[in-house]
Image (spheres, rainbow, N blue to C red):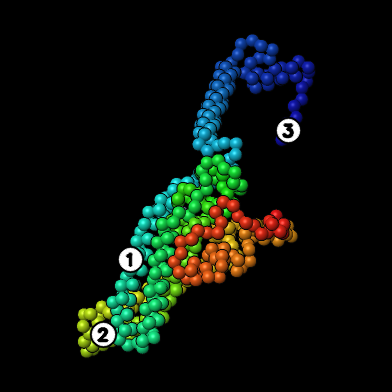
Amino acid sequence: MCERVSFSCKHELNHFISNSVENLYGTRFGGGMRSWRWYLSRVMRLFLRWFRLCLRRGRRKRTNRVRDLWNYGTVLMKSLYYNALTNSDTVLDCVFEPIYWLVDNMTRWFGVVFVSLVITLTSSIVIIVYLCVLPIIFSTYPLHWILWHLCYGHWNLLMLVFHYYKAITTCPGFPPQEKSDIPTVTICKKCIVPKPARTHHCSICNRCILKMDHHCPWLNNCVGHFNHRYFFSFCMFMTMGCIYCSISAKDMFLDAYNAIESSYQTPPPSFTREEKMLHKSLVYLWVLTSSVSVALGSLTLWHAVLITRAETSVERHINNRERTRLKLRGKIFRNPYHHGILNNWRRFFGVEKRSDWLTRVLLPSAHLPHEDGLLWDCPAYRNNTVVI
Ligand SMILES: [Zn+2]
Ligand SMILES: [Zn+2]
């Protein structure tokens, strides 16, 4: 609401304005004595300004301290891993290094346990075959079947033991540590030595391995160029031996199983202690050999596929990635080490003439592989058909 005020003369108007300003500022317009209100407002304003200044300074100090700590932490972190070639892979490697260390050491330690387990379980099966299965075969089977079991069983056992022993004791092959003229593909980041083609670093052995396939805890050794054949032959003869035991002892297992089941009847059949042991041993033999046949048989088949394609387990992943990359560009990837299916097997087993299939594959043989593991014959490069 606006109140209308009227003045009779100019003097009255000047007096009204002077009073209004005095009321507002507590002093007379144009200077003179200040009232206590004016002083109080000035003090309050000064106090507010000082308070705001303090707040601003405190905030700036805290921000500076946090920034200094952050910069110090960044320099500290960078001093641990940074160099000009650092990328995300290196950082991830650094982060996971303790886990790798733990897994590598555990695998190295478990390797000894696994090798002991293979020897113990295989020995237990051989003992059961000699003590329980062979006496039954001798007493119940015709002569030609007895001869077959004696010949095949012992040949399989000999091949199995020979190849396992060679697989765990043969060095997989290492690249030369000194300077040489061998063409190399890259430098190993861990060993800081040149890596020839097909060579890969094994973090468990902590060395570069020629034509590395994988590190096998069951051998406590790397599978590489010089023991790949022993490893595959061991897998093959172990699978064959398990299938043989499983099929040969099937009827005995069924009889033993029924006998154990009948022991729960009333009245229970009167089995002697030896007979009870025999039944349990036969069940153990059949269950173990059947399980290993399936598990190891699958692994052996997978390695047979890789040998047919002239690839190692490591190269399988690399080649698959390369195949996909080139496919996107409309190109076809060809494995440079592929010599054809039969030739791949020949080279793998070191077969040079036909009689070698008997002497080098079906009988124990310690011959060296076809190549030295450093230089590789690549038919695809020779024919200039590799599309890269
Ligand atoms: Zn290395
Ligand atoms: Zn290894």
Labels 2, 1: front one: 1
Mark 1: few, some, or many residues within 10 Å (few <14, many ≥20)? few
Q: Earlier in the sequence, mark 2 or mark 3?
A: 3
Towards the viewer: 74 or 343: 343
**Residue 287: image x %, image y %?**
37, 76
Which amino acid type is marked by label 2?
Ser
Mark 2 vs mark 3, foreground winner is 2
Residue 2 numbered tag: 3
Extreme residue in the right direction: 9
Q: Residue at position x 33%, y 76% from top?
A: 129
Residue 120, numbered label: 1
Residue in view at x 21 percent, y 87 percent: 270
Which element type, helix, strand or loop, lies under badge 1? helix
Tell us which disc is closer to us: 1 or 3. Answer: 1
| Residue situated in front as seen by the camera: 2 or 242 | 242
Q: CA distance from mark 2 to mark 1?
A: 30 Å
Distance from Cα at disc 2 to Cα at disc 3: 116 Å
Query: Could you tell me if residue 221 is visible in this image?
Result: yes
Q: Residue drawn at (58%, 40%), measured in percent from left and top?
A: 86
Q: Quadrant of residue 140?
A: bottom left
